[in-house]
Image (cartoon, rainbow, N blue to C red):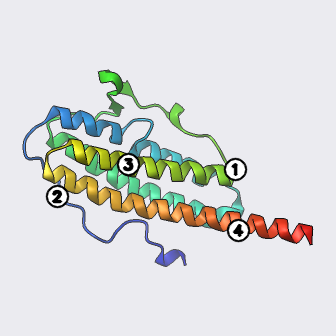
Amino acid sequence: MESTTLYASPEPYPSIQAAAPNIAYAQLLAASLASARSELTAITQYTYFSWVLDTEWAQLCTVFRNIANVEMRHLDLLGRTITALGGNPMFRAFPYKRPAFWSSGVLHYQSHIEKVLHISIAGEQEAIDGYQHLSKLIQDQSVIDLLQRIIVDEEIHLHLFQQYLTTRQTKSKQLFHNDII
């Protein structure tokens, strides 16, 4: 099954370009690059999960590592887009119009499988919602095309995590049912 698992859409990513320099757009994208809900956070969070899950979940650990690699591609694309917009792709965001540097303190240091999956599902849904919101705020079609392409990958990740959660819950119900009988 692992060799056929899709972690990213086979569709190519659009080329990195901007219609014109736009620091405001670059600052908007900074939150997706390096904030508590960002590609940098997803990479480090999924790497952490791949290290701490029980050996019973070895296949899911591989899924986390592969998804982290896709998120790394997103990080690269966003960083290059911020540069194309005339911004500096530092690992910081601008909440409340003030710079806030990324910190590993935003990670969820958790190893309980259901909590890990719920955290991952919520993170992917927040990413999708965030990119959809940015697509409405930004008026540069090249940037919008990139955001829409990234959303496709995030939807794949969301679906994978939901499948694992459903499988986990089904196994738990079967074990509970077997204990009663």
Seen at 51% across and 65% down, the residue is 160
Q: Which amino acid does the dot numbered 4 rest on?
A: Thr
Is disc 1 in contact with disc 4, using a CB cutoff of under 8 Å?
Answer: no
Comparing labels 3 and 1, the label whose residue is closer to the camera = 3
Looking at the rendered image, the disc whose residue lies closer to the viewer, 1 or 4, is 4
* Mark 3 surroundings: few (<14), some (14-19) or many (≥20) residues within 10 A: few
Q: Which mark's residue is nearer the viewer, 3 or 2?
A: 3
Name the mark on residue 129. 3
Q: Position of residue 14 (x, y in %)?
A: 19, 60
Q: Amino acid at mark 1?
A: His
Q: Which residue is mark 2?
A: 15
Spatial separation of the CA atoms under disc 1 and disc 4: 16 Å
Q: Residue at x 40, y 35 (%)?
A: 35
**Mark 2 or mark 1, earlier in chain:** 2
CA gap, disc 2 to disc 1? 39 Å
Q: Which residue is mark 4?
A: 170
Indicate which label's residue lies in the foreground, 4 or 2: 4
According to the picture, the residue beneath numbered tag 1 turns out to be 112
Quadrant hosting residue 13: bottom left
- Label 2: how many residues lie within 10 Å, few (<14), some (14-19) or many (20+)? few
Do the CB atoms of the residues marked 3 and 4 lie less than 8 Å apart?
no
Q: Residues within 10 Å of mark 1 (few under 14, many from 20)?
A: few
**Secondary structure state at the residue bearing disc 2:** loop
User: The disc labelled 2 sits on which kind of residue?
Assistant: Ser
Residue visible at 59% across and 51% down in the picture: 118
Residue under the image location 48 percent in, 59 percent down: 158
Give the x, y percent position of residue 75: 33, 48
